[in-house]
Amino acid sequence: MLLKTLKDDVLEYIKKRTIVFYSILMIFMIILGVRMAYMQVVGFEKYKRLSENNRIRLMRIKADRGFIKDTKGRLIVKNTPSYELDVVKEDVKDIDSLLDKLNEVVPIDKTFAKKQIKKSYLYEPAMIQRGLTFKQVSKVLENSADFHGVEIGLESVRSYQNNEAFSHILGYMSEVNENDIQKKDSYSSGDMIGKTGLEKVYENVLRGEDGARQVEVDSYGRILEVLSEKQSIPGKNIALTIDSDLQNFTHKLMKNRKGTVIVMDIDNFNILTMYSAPSYNLMSFTPFAKSNDRLDIIRNADKPLLNRAIEGSYPPGSVFKILTAVVALMEEKITPDTIFNCPGEFQYGNFKYRCWKRGGHGNLDLVHALEQSCDVYFYNVGLLTGIDPITKYANLFSLGRKTGINLPNEKSGFFPSREWKKKSKNEPWYPGETIITSIGQGYMATTPLQIAVMLSGIFNGGKVYAPNLVKYIEDADTGVQVMQEPNLLREVHLSEEAVSTALEGMRLVVHGKRATGYRALVKGVTIGGKTGTAQVVSLKHTEEMDNDDIPENLRDHSWFGSVFPVSDPKYVAVALIEHGGSGSKGAAPIIGAVINKMADLGYVWRQP
């Protein structure tokens, strides 16, 4: 009986274990069946693609970047072929060993290479070295059996007609970073992107659209057959308003100087020349350039990366007297015949404000006050006019605000107002501040481009456009050109008397008997000009020194603004020379040389 009971218990135990075993087996088979069904039905395309990646690859065809031309259609930026070293990580068994072998043939940055390989996508070639020489390419191909997973890629890189003459306009290109890739998924690691200048602003126009090629490869990754192909679409070309002859001339003219020169068409604000000195070598910022070259530029005390035309802010000095005169005439505070006496200084309350000419100018009317740049005359004009109208017109002519030029990093400068003074300092605006504002000193700071805009707006009758650097955009395949229309921002009502009086005063600055800007004279061309000297430090620090004894960093900034030809104003030219001393000596000769070159190039008719 006991034996029978024991036997039944054992059989029952075995039965339960068998049921559990078959239950687990059944569950496993169900899971396996579901997984197989998923792989066969839902994940079919994915796993088919993975299996075929050992045989079929999708290769990207990079689009050619658009060219950049000057206003006459001459190439200033084109593309040249460049070899790069790529690695497909799925085809490499030992990355470290491969990189060590490659380094014997092509010097590479192993840390950078591993980073590039790690972040590359499935079967995507990772670019680990740019700018290979033909000799290096030959060595890699000769030893291809030792470099399994290595490919030689071909890309196009920028080539410049004279990159230092155009560096601040064109801007440099560099490799995309993670932020660039996240913003736009059409970029891949190793792609180049415009980082500054027009290359950045017109990135989407210049870049084009990549194509793709589906190929069959062998076990070494070598192409056996092209299965299908989608052609890339090249980027569009852009033509600038810049004349390369004039730009190159200005580049040479500004050698060993710090400052900027701008020439602008007053009818549409197209820029013929905009040069900032010192400039820099755009090729120093390419990925295959030496890092020391970049560091030298970045650390340079002369700040070659600074585009002084739109990023430098300076007191405009006496060039601002043109606007002061126009505002006073528009507000009917003076007439062209209004006379003030200049004894060499101006007493207001307990303060004395000096004229640059210690002995004084005597009695002057408006045009002769402009001719001789009399400070005392404009102290009187400023007090009569008041700060509010001066601020109003300054803002209308883009002082204290961005001009809207199609370049990045433009600074707005600063122009003071009664409201600003109260808000920022909790103080009222004092008449003495109006006195110094009227001659372009005090709180204000302007970019040289803003001064060019101010003069252009005055002498075209009050139309203020956004300055422009691009003449047209051209389809690379069809050659169809889309002209870029002027962008009118605002119109300022100006009387003919105000404009003609200011123009006559500027003519006398260059051609008058007591001209302060005579160094800008050009044979056969009648020029209107205005000198400007912007103080860097208080006069008490340097007034007892001879000009040659003043340390360079304490010397005044030199301005010269011009409009020409006077008979029918067409262009404005502005020069700012940092620490160049007086405007008549530092900046005026520069503008004279530029206008003379423009006459040689046919922009201005030279009278016999």
Image (tube, helix red, strand yellow):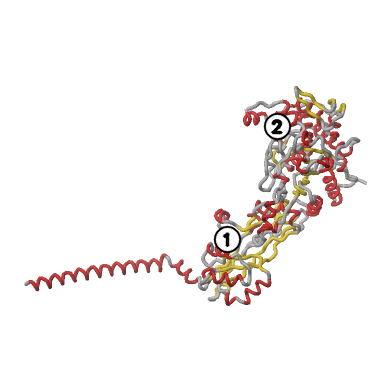
Badge 1: few (under 14), some or many (20 or more) residues near its Cα, within 10 Å?
A: many
Sequence-first disc among 1 and 2: 1
Q: Position of residue 580 (x, y in %)?
A: 80, 43
The residue pinned by badge 2 equals 392
Kindly identify the amino acid type of the residue bearing the numbered disc 1. Answer: Ser
Q: Position of residue 283 (x, y in %)?
A: 70, 59
The residue pinned by badge 1 equals 189
Q: Is residue 158 above or below residue 424?
A: below
Q: Position of residue 334 (x, y in %)?
A: 80, 26
Residue drawn 67% across the image and 64% down it:
156
Residue drawn 80% across the image and 33% down it:
496
Gap between marks 1 and 2 measured at Cα:
50 Å
> Is label 1 in a helix, a strand or a loop?
loop
The quarter of the picture where residue 7 lies is bottom left
Q: Report the front residue among 112 and 506.
A: 112
The quarter of the picture where residue 582 lies is top right
